[in-house]
Amino acid sequence: MNSRARRIAISVAAPMMILPLAACGVLGATESSDEASPTKGNDITVGLLLPEKENTRYEHFDYPFFKAKVAELTREQGDVKYANAEGKASKQAAQMQQMIDEKVDVIVLDAVDAKSISTSVEDADDAGIPVIAYDRLAEGPVDAYISFDNELVGEVQGRSLVEALGEGADSSDKIVMMNGSSTDPNAKQFKAGALAELNGKVTIAQSFDTKDWKAQNAEANMIEAIEKIGLKNIAGVYSANDSMAGGIIKALEDAGVTDLPPITGQDAELTAVQRIVTGEQYMSVYKSYPQEAESAAEMAVARIQGRDIQFDALARDKVDSPTHKGIPAQLVPVVALTQENLEQIVADGFYKVSDICTATYAEACAEIGLK
């Protein structure tokens, strides 16, 4: 089994175990010199810059879990200054400059535009403020990076789509590829991973880089694809995330499709999980945003408090950006989510059954045994 196949097998088959790092002797390493004499106390200010609100994860998961973890790690003394750019790179640059001017101790940045924000990252570096790239790898002198294995996400999506097409599928089957925003480096990684699984197995009849990841833009792209390919000739749709999958499904249903082709997604948004329950959407990629957010908070606090042993343990991987090499990183595992394993997100506390199986979906939940 090659390394890529092994990584996919682990992601899809293995249940995700989220263990507190203290149990592994990392956060609780009070005997280390840097734990005994931190360079800063608990009265610290952490800046958190998130990119948009189109995807519900940022407001519902990333921010609240990050804030709670900083409070826990600093005994309620640490402060989180939060700003959301609402998809505007210029707004995020202004927000970051404000945090630099206010002299926050550390900035955790999820970039709207990874390239254009590099000047702001350099400004923070000049001001002596460490920057941790969160979820998307910003260019410039970032101190560390935490995200999911983004190429693996695309591989899982691509392989799932091929499997959904069934044993009778061949390279003549036409699919539409709905990628994310061209300004998001993650989108390029998702796309590369998906192509590694799709090339030679299906025909990519139309491919789009969807502006701002917006559902309405994906819907417009899908309408164009239907016109060019023909409704009956679309065997499946690769959608890089759940929000776009919603727009794709709307376009197909408005065109008269009642038996939807398999459609992928990512983020395990509640509406997407409900579409998986009904069979409208084939799969999503479940990523533990609480684990990502809490690990980012741990990295930020360790970095600014000078706890080098702890920080190094949290960032054991290395990644390269277009501007810098060997950036310390942590890559969080992912899981392919289908009707077969929806109970996992309930077991992990991501959603309650009552959140998913509302009156509209109660019958469909019962049919697949989700209770």
Image (tube, rainbow, N blue to C red):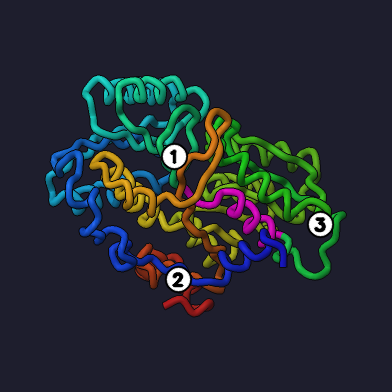
Locate residue 158 relative to residue 134 in the image: left or right: right
Task: Report whether residue 280 is seen.
Answer: no
**Residue beneath disc 3:** 201
Query: Which residue: 38% across, 38% down?
Result: 132
Of 85 and 110, the residue lying toward us: 110
The residue at the far front in this view is 33
Label located before the other in sequence (3 or 2): 3
Q: Earlier in the sequence, mark 1 or mark 3?
A: 1
* SS category of the residue bearing label 1: loop
Residue ID for mark 2: 344
- Between the C-alphas of marks 1 and 3, the distance is 32 Å
Q: Between residue 341 and residue 320, name the one nearer to us.
A: 320
Say what secondary structure mark 3 lies in: loop
Amino acid type shown at disc 2: Gln
User: Magenta span covers which residues?
Assistant: 147-161
Q: Which residue is mark 1?
A: 54
Q: Position of residue 344 (x, y in %)?
A: 45, 71
Outermost residue on the right side: it is 172
Circle nearer the viewer, 1 or 2: 2
The residue positioned 65% from the left and 65% from the top of the image is 6
Question: Magenta segment: does it hold 222?
Answer: no
Residue 219 in picture, x, y percent from top left? 61, 40
Q: State left or right for residue 45 relative to residue 342.
A: left
What SS does tag 2 mark? helix
Height in image: 2 above or below 232?
Answer: below
Q: Residues within 10 Å of mark 3 (few under 14, many from 20)?
A: some
- The one nearer the camera, 164 or 319, is 319
Q: Is residue 247 above or below residue 198?
A: above
The spot of residue 143 in percent (x, y) is 40, 36
